[in-house]
Amino acid sequence: KKEAGATDDPYRNDPERSPLLIPSSKKPFNAEPPQQMLVDRFLTPNHLFFVRNHLPVPSVEPKDYRLDVSLDSGSKSFTYDDLKSKFDKRSVVAVTQCAGNRRSEMVKVKPVKGLNWGSAAISNAKWSGVCLDDLLLKQGVDIEKVRGKYIVFEGMDKQPDDSPYGASIPLELARMLKRDIIIAYEMNGEPIPRDHGFPIRVIIPGVVGARQVKWLNKIYFSGEESTSHWQRRDYKGFNSSIDWHNVDFDSSVSISQLPVISAICEPEEDAELEEGAEEVTLRGYAWSGGGRGIIRVDVSADGGKTWQEARLKPNGQSPYRSYAWTLWEADVPLPTGARSTTLVVKAVDISYNVQPDSVEGIWNLRGCLSNAWHRVKVNIPAES
Amino acid sequence: KKEAGATDDPYRNDPERSPLLIPSSKKPFNAEPPQQMLVDRFLTPNHLFFVRNHLPVPSVEPKDYRLDVSLDSGSKSFTYDDLKSKFDKRSVVAVTQCAGNRRSEMVKVKPVKGLNWGSAAISNAKWSGVCLDDLLLKQGVDIEKVRGKYIVFEGMDKQPDDSPYGASIPLELARMLKRDIIIAYEMNGEPIPRDHGFPIRVIIPGVVGARQVKWLNKIYFSGEESTSHWQRRDYKGFNSSIDWHNVDFDSSVSISQLPVISAICEPEEDAELEEGAEEVTLRGYAWSGGGRGIIRVDVSADGGKTWQEARLKPNGQSPYRSYAWTLWEADVPLPTGARSTTLVVKAVDISYNVQPDSVEGIWNLRGCLSNAWHRVKVNIPAES
Ligand SMILES: [Mo]
Ligand SMILES: [Mo]
């Protein structure tokens, strides 16, 4: 079934993937599910969950796995069995989203560097594992009192020079989230698939996917951010007048918590609606970072001239610790006599943050944070 | 000095005010400072702090003052002296902003109901008093365990039917903020001026001004929100297709934490710059609700075609508990040969939330939450 790779291909041991996934790159493997399937279920099935790999997928035998936690008081190693058997199991339902989700819309304004993601570089799963707090307490450490400014995570995925993938978040943010940060060994009730971090990944709800390190094998505290490329030279925002000739990555703040976003997943761009259709049913998702729940989703079938509220499907979480997405639907009348029209969606979070109107206003050289109003052009054939 | 009011004028005992304040209504008194003066100082002087009164200003003798705190276990009354002498003093520097700040820009799109505020219905002060947590602990109550869904605040300002001003916030939000919610008796080191709540007001950082009840004399917990007009029939957001004929206030979530905003306070709209000016210096503020610090302010002198970053003056607070504003300045080249141009500002908060591009997209019938990019048209006379 699997293509035989050359023996020197670092990706030769990558896992098999569902043929339903739509790749944006093959080595490393990155892919999103069909967007209509994405919103069929509240919890994204593991085989459809979007894949964002920066490097080859590590092959880890559970019996060989160790998680090293380094503290001033010394280092401690946990086995896979330690994590599964010596701690209470804690679960959180949370979205993981790539910073580049919806980047393909930004590319249309002006080229950017990055994978050409559609609207499905986002998924929602139930993660279970050990609460970060409990892990530290086991070593007699209270996260409120630990020294350092950042908590750093390293993965077992390696660059050609053998340095690992790494990321960090401010310790203050970790403290705010603490019982919600999960050292996860289960995804939707199953062992985590290899593409998603087997055997262990960290889940930091409300924060960009890039910080939720997969194949996690090291945690430590530091006075500075992770020194990895992805922390220091990527995953940062800039204004639209900054391009590669004048960018200073040190001048910008690393992306951690994400802003409010939404997308129409059905119908899709350039869809042909029914002949003479007078109404269209829209389906999609809305989400905000920082645990901010979605309080309203507005949809338009006339390019944004008139709006109506979509029906929200409550995610069962509180508005201030809302880490899961909110799926929505709306039946919207189509403009009379139009042969084509633009559908639009925009969402509002509990802090009344809104999405920006245009992609132009948020364009940035890496094509991150593409959360403008989502516009989908559709055609309405005349009745024959 | 004070106009003699008719003896039946409920506003006859209102305090005197600085002649520098620019009223948007006189009875009740509402006023903002000149916007250039607003950004001269990090802490807004008390006499220049914007005033938002819904009702006549109560006259309270400190010796008669009581704060009633009602709990399942019974009610307790605190005197002004109790609050000043029996608790640790705690301070927080925080912005207070009216939900209607910058409403005058929304009015230009389509009329709304509300005071015609400019950009200065916002101010920043150091508030000192008793931590809400400490007040409850004194009664043996842990806010983590108290019953109810909302914490309700009532003022001593009364409507003609004798019902008081009231507001509430979700108990979950109060728990998140707890040591930052202050039962304040000082504003910038002085007793709180009458217009701002003498002798006691509640400060809830990161939350809209309307919930930070002035002349506070009652706190209780409830399974539902405050039943006041201002909680239930005002200070809520809607999309731009909702107007007075189809509005359902029950369908919307009360405004608590506010979204990211910024404004240019100098130069002002229609200003004449120097003859043949090639550069302009902009000054203004940026702020976000929910304690989210400002990480970037972009300014443009060509209506938003090109942008540069403003110099931020650090507010000394952490990015996740940033309740004060961030003042900023920028020297921006003017478009060559232009006789007029539009200056623009937009800010980004720590969660990478941005401001919406247009007022049209966020227009709402009450003119709240007017946080679009701030645009200021200026003229550049030719060199004579
Ligand atoms: Mo990502
Ligand atoms: Mo207000």
Image (spheres, coloured by chain):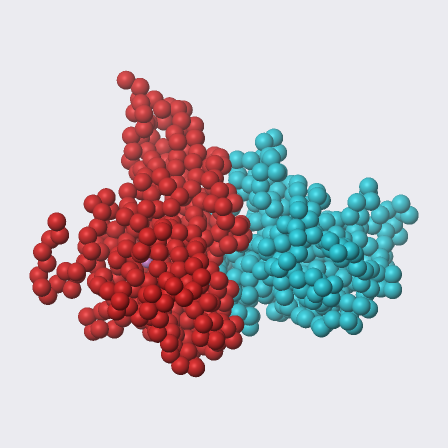
Chain colours: A red, B cyan
Residue A340, above or below B199: above
Residue B249, above or below B142: above
Residue A225, above or below B234: below
A106 and B48: which one is in front? A106
Residue at x-position 36% and y-position 51%: A189
**Outermost residue, bottom side:** A73
Q: Is residue B229 left or right of residue A58?
A: right
B275 and B97: which one is in front? B97
Question: Dividing the image into four equal quarters, which quarter contains ligand 1?
Answer: bottom left
Callout count: 0
Residue A250 appears anywhere in the view: no
Q: Is residue B21 left or right of residue A140?
A: right
Residue at x-position 87% and y-position 50%: B5
Residue A9, above or below B246: below
* Residue A61 location (% of width, % of height): 24, 65
* Residue B287 location (% of width, % of height): 55, 61
Quarter of the picture containing the N terminus of chain B is: bottom right
**Outermost residue, right side:** B7
* Residue B155 location (% of width, % of height): 76, 53
